[in-house]
Image (cartoon, helix red, strand yellow):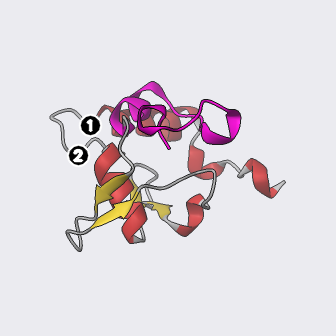
């Protein structure tokens, strides 16, 4: 729950996020699923497993929502920079994956170790 909506700033209410995602998340708690046009809660990394709601495209460039929550989160946070005129996040993923060999899809979830 965002602080602006009454949430606390204790560690159990916080989630690590990049500046870009934090700005786009703002204080939204729901998003629109483009497939159903209905509102769904956004993905909560403290309570849900990433792999239950998202997958990477085979080329490692886009995140796809596989559930209404995943699709609503991709849409609300524009995780693939599809709403703007420059897909900078896709360019960064291409750089990280193809040139450097580092990509989130290749990393293990620390909760699984």
Q: Marks 1/2: CA distance? A: 7 Å
For this view, does 82 lie left or right of residue 77?
left
Q: Earlier in the sequence, mark 1 or mark 2?
A: 2
For this view, does 49 lie left or right of residue 111?
left
Residue 6, position in %: x, y?
Answer: 48, 37
- For label 2, the SS is loop
Q: Nearer the viewer, residue 38 or 113?
A: 38
Q: How many marks?
A: 2
Q: Which residues are magenta?
A: 1-25
The residue most toward the top is: 19
For image coordinates 26% across by 37% down, the residue present is: 87
Residue 4, position in %: x, y?
Answer: 42, 32
Query: In the figure, 56 relative to 61: above or below?
Result: below
Q: Is residue 36 magenta?
A: no
Q: Nearer the viewer, residue 58 or 45?
A: 45
For this view, does 27 lie left or right of residue 1?
left
For image coordinates 35% across by 55% down, the residue present is: 30
Residue wearing tag 1: 87
Residue wearing tag 2: 82
Q: Quick check: marks 1 and 2 in contact, CB under 8 Å?
A: yes
Q: Is residue 4 magenta?
A: yes
For image coordinates 76% across by 48% down, the residue present is: 110
């Amino acid at each position: 729950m965002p602080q602006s909506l009454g949430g606390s700033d204790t560690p159990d209410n916080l989630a690590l996020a990049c500046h870009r995602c934090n700005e786009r998340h703002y204080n939204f708690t729901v998003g629109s699923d483009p497939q159903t046009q209905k509102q769904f809660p956004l993905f909560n990394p403290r309570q849900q497993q990433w792999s239950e709601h998202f997958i990477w495209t085979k080329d490692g460039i886009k995140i796809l929502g596989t559930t209404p929550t995943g699709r609503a989160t991709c849409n609300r946070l524009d995780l693939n920079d599809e709403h703007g005129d420059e897909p900078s996040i896709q360019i960064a993923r291409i750089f990280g994956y193809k040139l450097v060999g580092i990509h989130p899809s290749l990393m293990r979830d620390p909760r699984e170790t």
